[in-house]
Image (spheres, rainbow, N blue to C red):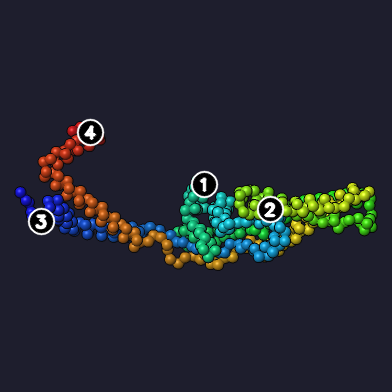
């Protein structure tokens, strides 16, 4: 009744199967060893026929934003400073410069400069861009440096093309306002021009009233000037709140704080306007004087920030600082002959091992009547699928 005491039948079958597999490997040991070695040697020989590829590398530091000087003036500017910072802030400038180098504008300049369509043997410029992208790798590290690697068969050409990426990026930056100082300068330059025109118009309107300057001594000009300055601050805060709506939700703490500041300024303005004594006989002059002082205050705020932005812009200047210029590489980067030979050997060994097991399984199946019948039916179905007669 018992087969083998202390040894289950299924365990015996497992041991037999493992022994059969081991026997199959031993029987084909020469094929499993010599076959992969021959394939590896053949792959190694073929790798010598592949033209070597050289990789040139250039490392540079992108333009750095100057924040310290700007921060001091932004605090004094209040609402307008917040608007400029929001408009000019860049979360990750390195990613932006990487995008610039991958842009069609930069790639097209490189294509025309180095005649890449002829070199890459492409018919359309879109295909040339793809080939250039495939041969170029640009990455940014935690150290703030940007690395550009270019592959080519000619080491000198690879170095020239890598350095040209930096040159074309520098030319593009000269035409774009991408740094914080540049954007602030452009913003305040535009606002300064608008306010200057309004201030000139207000001054002309003030002179047209016919009231002499000595009349100011008998009028509450100090109160009028205070109201005008406060109106300018309210305007600045309103501009800031309007800009913040574009990138902050109304529930954000910064937005709520800005709204509270605007409410306080409006309350102060309403109180000063209420407490301001009424002018007698010179209401038109007082109103125009207030408008002039309002525009004058705005002009002073914009002028200070505009001058600071120009100083910061001249200091940073969108200058790319090259740390390591690309040099013609002395050693090839591809093909890696040893790696190719190892991979080919391992792949051939796995394929031959699978072939040996399948061949042995088919032989064993041919010796078993039931399995032989199944194989015969499988062969018949296969011939029918191929459209062959049995």
**4 or 3: tag closer to the N-terminus:** 3
Residue at image coords 75%, 60%: 304
Q: Nearer the viewer, residue 140 or 208?
A: 208
Q: Which residue is mark 4?
A: 384
**4 or 2: tag closer to the N-terminus:** 2
Residue 345 in view here? yes
Query: Residue at the left extreme?
Result: 1
Q: Is residue 281 above or below residue 385?
A: below
Q: Judging from the image, what secondary structure is the residue with disc 4 in?
A: helix
Count of numbered circles in the view: 4
Q: Is residue 27 above or below residue 326?
A: above
| Number of the front mark, 3 or 2 | 2
Q: Which residue is mark 1?
A: 126
Q: Is there CB contact under 8 Å for labels 2 and 1?
A: no
| Number of the front mark, 1 or 3 | 3
**4 or 1: tag closer to the N-terminus:** 1
Report how far apart the C-alphas of labels 2 and 1 lie in the structure. 53 Å
Q: Is residue 175 left or right of residue 55?
A: right
Q: Which residue is mark 3?
A: 6
The local crowd at label 1, few if under 14, some if 14 to 19, many if 20 or more residues have their Cα within 10 Å, is few
Residue at image coords 31%, 60%: 342
Q: Which mark is residue 213?
A: none
Q: Judging from the image, what secondary structure is the residue with disc 3 in?
A: loop
């Amino acid at each position: 009744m018992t087969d083998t005491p202390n040894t289950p039948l299924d365990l015996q079958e497992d041991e037999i199967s493992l022994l059969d597999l081991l026997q199959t490997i031993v029987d084909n040991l020469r094929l499993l060893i010599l076959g992969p070695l021959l394939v590896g040697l053949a792959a190694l020989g073929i790798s010598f026929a592949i033209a070597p590829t050289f990789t040139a590398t250039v490392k540079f530091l992108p333009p750095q934003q100057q924040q310290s000087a700007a921060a001091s003036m932004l605090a004094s500017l209040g609402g307008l400073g917040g608007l400029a910072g929001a408009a000019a802030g860049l979360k990750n400038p390195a990613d932006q410069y990487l995008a610039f180098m991958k842009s069609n504008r930069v790639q097209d300049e490189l294509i025309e400069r180095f005649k890449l369509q002829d070199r890459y043997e492409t018919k359309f410029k879109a295909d040339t861009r793809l080939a250039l992208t495939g041969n170029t790798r640009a990455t940014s590290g935690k150290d703030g440096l940007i690395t550009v690697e270019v592959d080519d068969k000619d080491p000198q050409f690879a170095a020239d093309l890598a350095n040209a990426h930096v040159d074309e990026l520098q030319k593009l930056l000269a035409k774009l306002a991408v740094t914080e100082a540049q954007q602030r300068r452009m913003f305040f330059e535009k606002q300064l021009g608008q306010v200057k025109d309004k201030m000139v118009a207000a001054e002309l309107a003030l002179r047209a009233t016919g009231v002499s300057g000595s009349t100011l001594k008998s009028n509450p000009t100090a109160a009028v000037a205070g109201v005008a300055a406060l109106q300018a601050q309210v305007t600045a805060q309103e501009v800031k709140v309007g800009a913040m709506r574009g990138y902050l939700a109304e529930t954000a703490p910064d937005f709520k704080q800005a709204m509270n500041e605007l409410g306080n300024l409006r309350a102060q303005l309403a109180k000063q306007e209420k407490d301001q004594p009424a002018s007698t006989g010179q209401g038109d002059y007082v109103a125009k004087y207030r408008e002039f002082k309002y525009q004058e205050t705005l002009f002073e705020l914009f002028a200070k920030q505009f001058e600071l932005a120009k100083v910061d812009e001249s200091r940073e200047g969108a200058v790319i600082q090259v740390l390591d210029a690309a040099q013609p590489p002395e050693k090839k980067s591809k093909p890696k002959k040893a790696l190719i030979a190892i991979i080919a050997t391992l792949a051939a060994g796995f394929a031959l091992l699978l072939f040996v097991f399948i061949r042995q399984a088919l032989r064993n199946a041919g010796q078993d009547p039931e399995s032989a019948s199944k194989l015969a039916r499988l062969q018949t179905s296969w011939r029918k699928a191929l459209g062959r007669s049995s």
